[in-house]
Image (tube, rainbow, N blue to C red):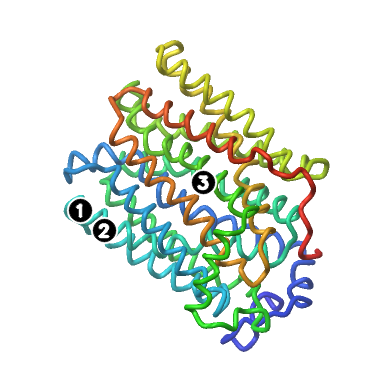
């Protein structure tokens, strides 16, 4: 705690040497990774625990429950573009504290909502706070590590944060079994309070001397420069297209598994969680593979596996061969590759920009990555016919597009911008 929290209790101005000293402690490293992993899991906490309640909420409140996911992802995507430049100016911790307060308020307000319109609006507000955690946890990792070490650290965080999407649907189903859908949002508020307390034990990874000195307007101009950065945009578009597929499954799976295949709500978490176990195992493997292969090679090979599985998924879904398992098995392989694709593209993209633009780069990347869920929801609403075909078709098309974005990508190792 001495190394992590400023003794004055007012500012958190750690220089790089002090930060490295803090990171040298095993206890400090473990606690730091646990908190960062929980911050990165805020998206899963706010979405996955809600999935089993979607049919019930539609019945009780009317309207389309998928819009609550769409609203959340829309707010999540847009707000990151604001928080990125702010954190480059004021540091990482102040936005984290503010964001967690907004998440708590949004969660409580969702629980008190009386119709679907109110839920959707408060989900947008909730997302404005929730987006700070995943975005700034990536930025903090980039503050402390170079590209390869950052990818290894993100793989570790993927294993930690895997608890949320596995436990989320189970917790949501359990809460529905003993109470109403409102309990789910009260549970989110409690998690928000716990995370607020945990933030006091995080270091400030962006010292004052390295913060952006320009005005906010000038800082927002970094987005224009990022859009012109071909290397950065290649990895950003790759993971964005891949996440259209991820959110097509997240949004479409409750209807496919519960309504079409008739799986009981309390068992939905089992079928959803098996994919997260795959991500966890591949994330663990990724840490070892990074000792031998470059980020580009790992991304390419993972995409090859994902494309193959996506084509099989579409073929089985459109022909009806395999039934439920014709969806479950291919989705396991597709989802598992996220353990490499997400971590490696994030690390590669952030290593392609100057340190002073890290937060803006993380914000734009996160905005497109998580905002891709809006595309998924819109396509499902337009094309869904109550069968797995629409979901599977969308997944196959966008994963092929994700793979095409990496054509011509260099194989050379990424420059290590920060020694650790």
Q: Is residue 388 left or right of residue 10?
A: left
Provide residue 345's location: percent of width, then percent of height.
Answer: 63, 48
Q: CA distance from mark 3 to mark 1?
A: 28 Å
The image quadrant of residue 170 is: top left
Figure quadrant of the C terminus: bottom right
Q: Nearer the viewer, mark 3 or mark 1?
A: 3
Q: Quadrant of residue 402?
A: top right
Residue neighbourhood size for the residue with mark 2, other residues' Cα within 10 Å, grouped as few (<14), some (14–19), many (≥20): some
Quarter of the figure with the N terminus:
bottom right
Q: Within the image, what quadrant is residue 303 found in? A: top right
Within 10 angstroms of label 1, few (less than 14), some, or many (20 or more) residues? some
Q: Which residue is mark 2?
A: 121
Give the CA distance from mark 2 to mark 3.
25 Å
Q: What residue is shown at x 23% (from left), y 59% (from top)?
A: 112
Q: Residue at x 67, y 69 (%)?
A: 355
In the image, what residue occupies the spot 36% across and 39% down? Answer: 173
Q: Measured along the vertical axis of the image, is residue 90 above or below residue 305?
A: below
- Count the marks: 3
Q: Nearer the viewer, residue 350 or 13?
A: 350
Front residue of 313/164: it is 313
Q: Secondary structure at mark 1?
A: helix
How far apart in space, not on screen, are marks 2 and 1 (Cα)?
Answer: 6 Å
Name the secondary structure under disc 3.
helix
Query: Which residue is under mark 3?
Result: 240
Query: Between residues 383 and 166, which one lies in front from this camera angle?
Result: 383
Q: Are marks 2 and 1 in contact (CB under 8 Å)?
A: yes
User: Do the numbered discs 2 and 3 sit on residues whose CB atoms are within 8 Å?
Assistant: no
Q: Position of residue 311 (x, y in %)?
A: 52, 22
């Amino acid at each position: 705690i001495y190394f992590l929290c400023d003794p004055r209790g007012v500012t958190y101005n750690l220089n790089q040497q002090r930060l490295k000293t803090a990171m040298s402690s095993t206890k400090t490293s473990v606690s730091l990774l646990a908190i960062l992993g929980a911050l990165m899991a805020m998206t899963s906490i706010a979405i996955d625990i809600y999935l089993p309640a979607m049919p019930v909420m539609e019945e009780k409140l009317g309207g389309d429950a998928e819009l609550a996911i769409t609203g959340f992802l829309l707010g999540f995507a847009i707000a990151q573009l604001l928080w990125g430049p702010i954190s480059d100016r004021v540091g990482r911790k102040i936005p984290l504290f503010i964001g967690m307060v907004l998440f708590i308020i949004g969660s409580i307000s969702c629980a008190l909502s009386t119709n679907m319109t109110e839920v959707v609006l408060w989900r947008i507000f909730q997302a404005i706070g929730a987006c700070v955690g995943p975005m700034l946890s990536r930025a903090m990792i980039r503050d402390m590590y170079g590209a390869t070490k950052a990818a290894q650290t993100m793989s570790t965080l993927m294993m930690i944060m895997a608890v949320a999407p596995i436990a989320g649907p189970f917790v949501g189903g359990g809460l529905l079994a003993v109470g109403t859908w409102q309990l789910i949002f009260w549970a989110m508020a409690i998690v928000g309070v716990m995370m607020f307390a945990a933030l006091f034990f995080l270091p400030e990874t962006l010292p004052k001397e390295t913060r952006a000195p320009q005005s906010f307007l000038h800082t927002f101009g970094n987005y224009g420069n990022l859009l012109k950065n071909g290397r950065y945009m290649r990895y950003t578009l790759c993971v964005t297209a891949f996440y259209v597929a991820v959110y097509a499954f997240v949004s479409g799976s409750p209807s496919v598994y519960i309504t079409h295949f008739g799986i009981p709500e309390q068992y939905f978490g089992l079928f959803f969680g098996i994919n997260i176990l795959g991500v966890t195992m591949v994330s663990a493997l990724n840490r070892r593979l990074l000792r031998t292969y470059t980020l580009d090679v790992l991304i390419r090979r993972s995409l090859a596996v994902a494309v193959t599985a996506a084509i099989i998924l579409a073929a089985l879904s459109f022909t009806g061969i395999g039934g439920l398992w014709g969806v479950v098995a291919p989705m396991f392989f597709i989802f598992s590759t996220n353990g490499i694709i997400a971590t490696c593209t994030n690390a590669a993209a952030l290593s392609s920009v100057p340190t002073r633009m890290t937060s803006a780069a993380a914000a734009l990347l996160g905005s497109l990555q998580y905002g891709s869920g809006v595309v998924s929801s819109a396509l499902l609403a337009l094309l869904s016919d109550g069968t797995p075909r629409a979901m599977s078709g969308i997944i196959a098309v966008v994963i092929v597009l994700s793979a095409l974005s990496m054509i011509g990508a260099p194989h050379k190792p990424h420059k290590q911008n920060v020694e650790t």
